[in-house]
Image (spheres, rainbow, N blue to C red):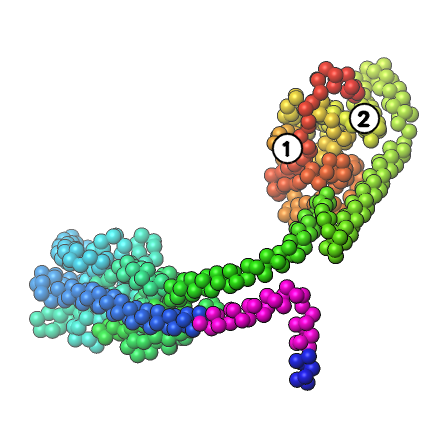
Amino acid sequence: MKKKRIGSRVALFTDMSMERKLLLVFLVIITLPLSVISIYNFKSYTGSIQDNTIAYSEKLTDQMMDGIDDYIDDMKRISSMPAYVNEIKQNLIRSNQFHEQKKEKEQDGNTVFDPSEFDTMLSIQRGIEGNVSFINNIKRGANSVYIFDKYGNGYYSAKDGGVRLDLKMSYDFWSEQAKGSNGEALLFGTQAYTSNLQSTRYAFTVVRKIVDGLWNPIGLIAVEANVSMLQNQVAELDKVTHGQSMIVDERGHVIYDSQQKLLAKDVSGSELFRKAQGSGGSFYDESEGKSRLNIYSTSPKTNWKVIISIPVHELTREAIVTRNTTLAATFAIIIVAMIISIFLTFALTKPLTQMIQLMKKVQGGDLEVRFQVKRRDEIGLLGHQFNRMLERIRQLIQDIYRIEQQKTEAELQALQSQINPHFIYNTLETIRMTAELNDDIEAADMISILGKLLRYSTSDMNGHSTLKQEIAYVVNYIELLNCRYSGRFRLHIDLPHEYDHYEIIRLIFQPIIENAAYHGFDDSKPCMNLGIVCEATDERLVFHITDDGCGMNRETLNKLNDDLRNEQPPDKGIEGGIGLKNVHQRIRMHYGAGCGLEVYSTPGEGTEIRLTLPLPAATEDSESKHKKEAVS
């Protein structure tokens, strides 16, 4: 088995071209030692950078946690101020007495309003809230300070006007948690609440019992800080480390995170939190298929933990620059050594590259390319066969085009030959004259319009018409429709007169108007507005044919446009008109792939069909064109 494997590998090498053999041997001899040295240096440098990053990041997180600890210490000191301000304690005692008396009256059934009670309550409220406002301005970032009496009646003053709407619920939670405390400050992690400004906010809180001189609880104070005060510190840390940070409490609830998507959420079950055990350290993991270095540090005062997740590719960015520089120098040496070999192989590969480019152009539809045969070797023979193949493909395309054109002409001739046009002309003229003799002018006009339509539509379909004649045919068609449907169609035409004598193939506007009238008419509207507007670009004439009918849904619109782009044959059995697909195919066959129809529609608003034709060349003299024009 080993001999067979070795033999197959030797055969693979021997079957290679000479250029590949030389390049392969050269690459192995030159690049192998240089690659080993570069990889070794890159790994050593990367390890050094990661070690330094861990040490530096741990120092930064410790500094940030020290700052947060100092801030929380200040909040705790603020929460202790009511113990030193007798006015606050006296007002809380008055508030407690007031509500005790009020409760006793209510129990006795005395609900008579006493104006003095309002004055008393107002005095208490002003006294406490004045002190709250003073406390609130002491520390920057403490957005709200709340003081409650022992019955849960709150007094507050918020800097930014954002006050909790769930104040009663918050008090019940805080008082329950502080029930077993002896007046020490309690720290609560980030909680979400809805403010009276109808916005969701996130804040962490320091809560402390308020006691009188005998250590009897008389109330509760809550000092609340919005998590936005952490934003600048975390953003600065992320900027330095190029990572993302998260602060969590000891239970795994998020205090703050860089993207602010996990605020107040429980991440204790996440793998990241489970691995961040102990007071500090680092570990690697993967998230979304990317390797990360996680560095964490814990505050000894609050037990809050900062976890920084740094993508490994950010750590190795400088090492990658060094690696790339080394590789660039290595490649430069290799290039210099290989330049002679490449020069020799270039002469052989250049003709093949040129042929590949020509094949790509052919794939894009350009069949006019030619491979210049300069040699009589194998490449020259290949180029000669390539040219013969293109010539044959072009001939086959011309044959198919001619067959399709003949098929289309045969279909139109079959439609025309179903009736005898001259017999119908004479019969309609006889009917019209009879109507005029009987003073039925309306019927005579309708027959006259019908005769014009029939004469134009059954004339030589292989010949050309002018834009003016085509539009006149559409106008006659709308007039005949209005005779039948009592003026329910309005046609607006905005075409530059300079294109009146622009030659086009026959019957390309009327089928579109007919399609809009019969398939887009909205019975809920008194009339349908139709429009034909011409827009000239640098290379094309674009006709916007619009209606305000019922439009079509997205599925029908996409199928119609797909059929037009793929040039699917027209549906059989469609009554009236030649159809949009037939018009599109005739335009593409006559003017080329850059022309045709494109449909835009909105249900209930209408449909727009953009008809694109080539921009006319320098027009002939208007008077000579007028002489050539057939009068409809």
Which stretch appears magenta?
A: 8-37
- Crowding at dot 2, Cα within 10 Å, few <14 / some 14-19 / many 20+, comes out as some
Give the Cα separation between the discs numbered 1 and 2. 29 Å
Q: Which mark is residue 539?
A: 1
* Residue at x 28% of width, y 58% of height: 232
Taking the image as shown, residue 428 lies to the left or right of residue 586, namely right
* Depth check, front residue: 142 or 30: 30
* Amino acid tagged 2: Tyr
Taking the image as shown, residue 388 lies to the left or right of residue 497, namely right
Judge depth for marks 1 and 2 and give the one in front: 1
Would residue 220 be visible to someone looking at this image? no
Location of residue 109 by image quarter? bottom left
The answer to if 624 sits in the magenta stretch is no
* Residue at x 11% of width, y 67% of height: 83
Residue at which label 2 appears: 456
Location of residue 571 by image quarter? top right
Would residue 607 be visible to someone looking at this image? yes
